[in-house]
Amino acid sequence: MLAMVGMLTTARDAGAVESRRDVETDHVDAKDDGGPRSVGVLIHPMTMATGWYGGEVDVALNEHGVIGFEGDGLFTWARGAHVALGAAYFFRRSFRGFYLRDTVDWARAAAGGVADSGFGTSFTLGYAWTWSVGPTLRLGGGFRVAQTDIIGAQPSPIALHGFGLKVDADLGWVF
């Protein structure tokens, strides 16, 4: 009984992202983190509210660096596609804590005989919460700059150009 109380009061979560130099020497137990978090699958709920559906896959490169691939599609009164490649630096460890993220993206949308496409970049600063079992929430904000080409005779109601604010609100699971 005394050993059980001692074990319960001294046990703590193993939250560190392990590197290739680390070797797991203890047995797997309920408090073991199962190794480094290396892949995240996320959705973008705020963009889904505007009709863009898609998600993101992030892969940890090391203890602080993550590279991400995004894809979204617009299937409402207009049609569109958005793809992005991003890199994030986590100040604490991958998928946890404060992060700085940069993305380069391409988007195209069309409606009513008018099309708009272009390239852009965005920078965000935020915070990511990842629980030990895998759910994650990432919230951040920053700015976006885009250059577009409007194709058609009318002004585009779906313009993707200029400078603007960006909200990074993602929900998912990290493995």
Image (cartoon, helix red, strand yellow):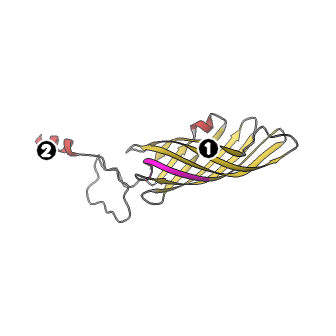
Q: Using residue 73 as the reference point, say whether residue 58 is left or right of it.
A: left
The amino acid type, in three-letter code, at marker 1 is Gly
Q: Using residue 89 as the reference point, say whether residue 32 is left or right of it.
A: left
Residue 27 in the image: state x and y as whole percent.
Answer: 26, 55
In the image, 168 versus 28, the foreground residue is: 168
* Residue 48 picture quarter: top right
Residue 169 in the image: state x and y as whole percent.
Answer: 54, 40
> Dot 2 corresponds to which residue?
3
> Dot 1 corresponds to which residue?
54
Circle 2 packing at 10 Å, graded few (<14), some (14-19), many (20+), is few
Residue 173 in the image: state x and y as whole percent.
Answer: 47, 44
Q: Residue at x 75, y 38 (%)?
A: 78
Q: Are marks 1 and 2 in contact (CB under 8 Å)?
A: no
Q: Specify which label sits upstream in the sequence, 1 or 2.
A: 2
Circle 1 packing at 10 Å, graded few (<14), some (14-19), many (20+), is some
Which SS type dominates the magenta stretch? strand
Q: Residue at x 33, y 63 (%)?
A: 22
Q: Residue at x 70, y 41 (%)?
A: 74
Residue 137's disc number: none
Secondary structure type for disc 2: helix
* Residue 75 picture quarter: top right
Q: Which residues are magenta?
A: 94-103
The amino acid type, in three-letter code, at marker 2 is Ala
